[in-house]
């Protein structure tokens, strides 16, 4: 699949973005105007909030729910966090004025534009694969399947607990927090391969560990709390 | 062990507290002035921050780190949250002005004064039982052991992962968050029996589940992620 790739104007929501970064992701030689997220047009008509969430999670450092006064500037593009402190200062972001852990939190979300675009595509493909997801229209399905293969109808699961995710969960929130979160099998690696959806509570439980480390931790805990359920507790890691 | 039990003045830090609630927890017929936390006097000399944390976690609804503008009034006494909305309004706390989830969060921390006092005693006993804890002086040890039995020298563990906790962790924090948290085996039940210390990450991972539910969940996840490590996955709960 060949894409247009033309430079498109920086969106007004991306106030810290450099010029000439955003690209058109429609097919090469398309008619009509260039678009960054053509594969989310159908989602916009059936679940606009999901489209918005996918773009936000794929491209921004923090969500709107992070309202603490310590939080620093909200919704900076991930690729902007690849710039040096000096370059950021020229954009109006004073990193040195933020607490160290806020700087760290912003920096760990850094990712190149191309990776973020691939994550958005992957998340869209995964969302259409959830139980009770609206079926993608033909154009969108072809686009996504040419990138990632057949959409896993009803099989998109939480990559932590491995249970299926229901698309309806996108519309549910408790205490202002969405029930579905975007997570990373290996934290901080924001690539299409490493990124997926999780239950909110699974993502929180995974914490700073990789998914495999988290399973190791579970085995380790159960070896103490419920040794009888494990086959071979003596082979477990000790830390 | 008989305690004094005399009413003591409401501390200046407890601005929403009713009069005539706070009690003296020194031994009956003690000399000198009445004290609410006599068993924390020794801790005050060796680790004042730990004393402060124990009192805060035992008695307050939220910690200072909860700085969001949505958070509502900070550090309300847990027993104050037993009052009705009308009674709270008279104390200057307008519950109806807070978002529902903030109200819920405050209400779920509600606990009677006596339970909070017992939690403070228990946490102190547990803290002295951690690895590398300073040894309690004789008076304090006798006081705590008459309540809960022999201090478990070096054996106080995280009640989630069941690994020993090191007293030094009280002095460590990452991103402004302490490494040791006070948690509840069954969430929301703030009693001495149900309350203990955890690693911060273990407490977060436990989330809204009881510890047993959390172990069930782990078994369930591992039955999908690593079925070979479990003895009898078919007997696991399915939800």
Image (tube, coloured by chain):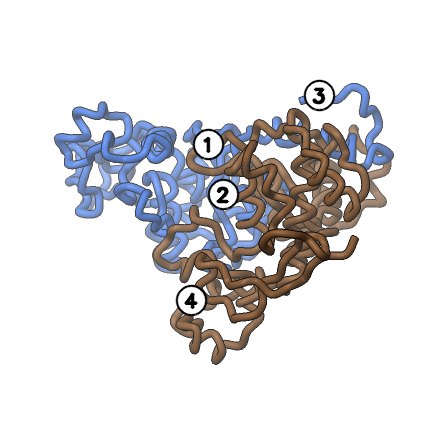
Chain colours: A brown, B blue
The spot of residue A182 in percent (x, y) is: 60, 45
Which of the 4 quarters of the picture holds residue A154? top right
Label 1: how many Cα within 10 Å (few below 14, some 14–19, many 20+): few
Could you tell me which secondary element the residue under label 1 belongs to?
strand
Residue designated by label 1 = A174
Q: Which residue is mark 2?
A: B126
Give whichever of A73, A126 is nearer the camera. A126
Using the image, determine if residue B200 lies above or below residue B208: below
User: Which mark lies nearer to you, 3 or 1?
Assistant: 1
User: Which of A160/A148 is in front?
Assistant: A148
2 or 1: mark nearer the eye: 1
Asked if marks 4 and 3 fall on the same chain, the answer is: no
Front one among B6 and B22:
B22
Q: Which of the two discs, 4 and 1, sits closer to the camera?
A: 1
Residue pictured at 61% horizontal, 30% vertical: A167
Q: Is residue A22 visible?
A: yes
Distance from label 3 to label 2 (Cα)?
A: 35 Å
**What separation in Å lies between label 4 and label 3 (alpha carbons)?**
44 Å
Q: Which circle marks residue B238 in the picture?
A: 3
Residue appearing at x 35%, y 42% in the figure: B62
The answer to whether any part of residue B157 appears in the image is: no
């Amino acid at each position: 699949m060949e894409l247009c790739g033309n430079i498109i104007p920086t969106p007004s929501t991306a106030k810290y973005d450099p010029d000439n970064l955003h690209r058109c992701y429609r097919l090469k030689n398309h008619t009509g105007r260039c678009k960054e997220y053509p594969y989310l047009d159908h989602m916009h008509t059936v679940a606009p909030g999901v489209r918005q969430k996918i773009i936000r999670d794929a491209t921004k450092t923090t969500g709107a729910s992070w309202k603490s006064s310590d939080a620093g500037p909200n919704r900076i593009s991930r690729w902007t966090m690849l710039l040096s402190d000096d370059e950021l200062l020229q954009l109006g972001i004073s990193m040195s004025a933020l607490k160290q852990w806020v700087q760290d939190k912003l920096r760990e979300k850094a990712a190149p534009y191309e990776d973020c675009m691939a994550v958005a595509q992957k998340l869209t493909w995964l969302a259409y694969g959830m139980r009770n997801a609206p079926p993608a229209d033909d154009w969108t399905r072809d686009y996504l399947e040419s990138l990632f293969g057949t959409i896993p109808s009803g099989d998109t699961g939480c990559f932590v607990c491995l249970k299926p995710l229901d698309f309806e969960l996108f519309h549910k929130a408790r205490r202002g927090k969405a029930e579905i979160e975007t997570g990373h099998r290996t934290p901080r690696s924001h690539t299409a391969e490493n990124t997926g959806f999780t239950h909110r509570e699974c993502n929180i439980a995974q914490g700073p560990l990789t998914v495999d480390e988290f399973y190791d931790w579970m085995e380790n805990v159960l070896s103490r709390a419920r040794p009888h359920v494990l086959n071979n507790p003596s082979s477990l890691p000790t830390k």
